[in-house]
């Protein structure tokens, strides 16, 4: 072989080395994030908290991990389609945020891709895990307390509206796990407070309008909005209707009070999203869902919108103000 040919051969081989090394690097992991709402309705604070949780394991979106977002836009009938799309995308892990219907859809669709959920009911009863301590399958996550807080939330509303004698309970029949537990808890709690309960169903914006028209016709004193991802996507709509019709209302999360709702009491969902992000990061690092115990959150918050209270002609008792985690002026 001539010297010039030898140098050319070495040069061409060296030029290929970086390409070969690049080809051997592991592909960037992909998180499939199944959202209940839309980019416009998903609270930014939750996604910031989720990314902070990921950061705890050293993952930064766009740098060493990719997130594929899928948005149900408040439609429960879209979950199966969206999960199937993520599975076709061959994502590394699926997370559903604080979303019981989405969590059930993901669990029904795959037994191999790791799932990190957030649910307000008992995940064992829902069939998501074998036990809280040892989930045993491909799913684990966070159990936040919303559905179980109905009695406490109703009592706080009674403190703010002491003259109330009746309460409407708004639930979404398309989300039976949430709806059934909310109705059961309310029917048990209301008599102890001397309250009559009337149940209203809504799965669409039009049905929300109809429910409000009916509860005004029935002269119901106050409204209890059940915990539900669809209602969260319509929180501005709910707050505006309640304000326009002068109906004191209580909600499951601070997003509603920030949107103009009277008061909220429930789990700190931003903290829930942080914990979900932390678990997703641990799974990307190699942890097994079967060995990661379900986290049960205990961080609750009471938020009162004082401006809305004044508009409704309500005086917030000092004892209630003192217990509030935040008062919106």
Image: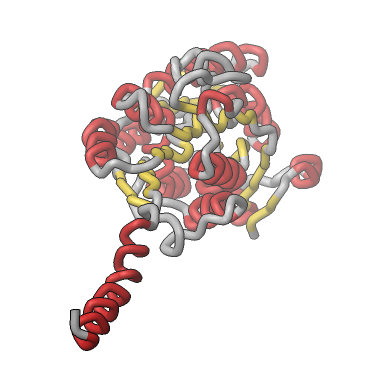
Instruction: Give the x, y percent position of residue 216.
Output: 40, 33
Q: Visible in this render: residue 231? A: no
- The correct choice, above or below, for 163 with respect to 123 in the image is below
Q: Which residue occupies 69% across, 51% down?
A: 326
Q: Which residue occupies 45% across, 43% down?
A: 242
Q: Which residue occupies 52% across, 39% down?
A: 286
Q: Is residue 324 left or right of residue 197?
A: right
> Residue lying farthest front?
1
Q: In front: 301, or 26? A: 26
Question: In the figure, residue 126 lies in which quadrant?
Answer: top left
Quadrant in the picture for the C terminus: bottom right
- The correct choice, above or below, for 327 with respect to 205 in the image is below
Q: Is residue 2 left or right of residue 123?
A: left
Quadrant in the picture for the N terminus: bottom left
Instruction: Give the x, y percent position of residue 210.
Output: 29, 33
Q: In front: 168, or 219? A: 168
Q: In front: 6, or 309? A: 6
Q: Is residue 185 left or right of residue 200?
A: right
Q: Visible in this render: residue 267? A: yes
Q: Which residue occupies 56% across, 52% down?
A: 49
Total count of labels: 0
- The correct choice, above or below, for 182 with respect to 288 in the image is above
Q: In front: 194, or 16? A: 16
Q: Is residue 259 left or right of residue 71?
A: right
Instruction: Give the x, y percent position of residue 202.
Output: 33, 30
């Amino acid at each position: 072989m001539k010297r010039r040919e030898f140098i050319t051969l070495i040069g061409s081989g060296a030029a290929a080395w970086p390409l070969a090394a690049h080809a051997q690097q592991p592909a960037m992991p992909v998180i499939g994030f199944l959202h209940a709402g839309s980019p416009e309705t998903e609270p930014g604070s939750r996604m910031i908290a989720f990314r902070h949780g990921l950061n705890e394991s050293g993952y930064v979106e766009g740098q060493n991990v990719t997130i594929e977002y899928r948005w149900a836009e408040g439609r429960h009938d879209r979950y199966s389609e969206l999960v199937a799309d993520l599975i076709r995308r061959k994502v590394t892990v699926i997370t559903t945020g604080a979303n019981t219907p989405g969590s059930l859809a993901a669990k029904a669709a795959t037994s191999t891709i790791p799932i990190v959920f957030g649910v307000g009911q008992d995940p064992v009863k829902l069939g998501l895990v074998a036990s809280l301590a040892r989930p045993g399958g491909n799913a684990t996550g966070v159990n936040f307390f919303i559905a179980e807080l109905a009695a406490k939330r109703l009592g706080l509303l009674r403190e703010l509206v002491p003259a109330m004698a009746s309460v409407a309970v708004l639930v979404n029949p398309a989300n039976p796990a949430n709806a059934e537990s909310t109705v059961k808890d309310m029917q048990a709690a209301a008599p102890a407070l001397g309250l009559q309960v009337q149940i209203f169903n809504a799965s669409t914006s039009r049905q929300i309008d109809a429910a409000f028209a009916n509860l005004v016709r029935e002269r119901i004193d106050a409204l209890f909005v059940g915990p539900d991802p669809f209602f969260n996507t319509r929180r501005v709509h709910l707050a505006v209707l309640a304000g326009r019709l002068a109906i004191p209302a209580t909600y499951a999360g601070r997003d509603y009070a920030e949107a103009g709702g009277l008061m909220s009491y429930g789990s700190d969902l931003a903290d829930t999203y942080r914990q979900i992000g932390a678990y997703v990061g641990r799974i990307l690092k190699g942890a097994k869902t079967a060995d990661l115990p379900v986290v049960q959150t205990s961080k609750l918050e009471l938020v009162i919108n004082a401006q809305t209270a004044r508009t409704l002609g309500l005086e917030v008792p000092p004892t209630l103000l003192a217990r509030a985690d935040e008062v919106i002026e």
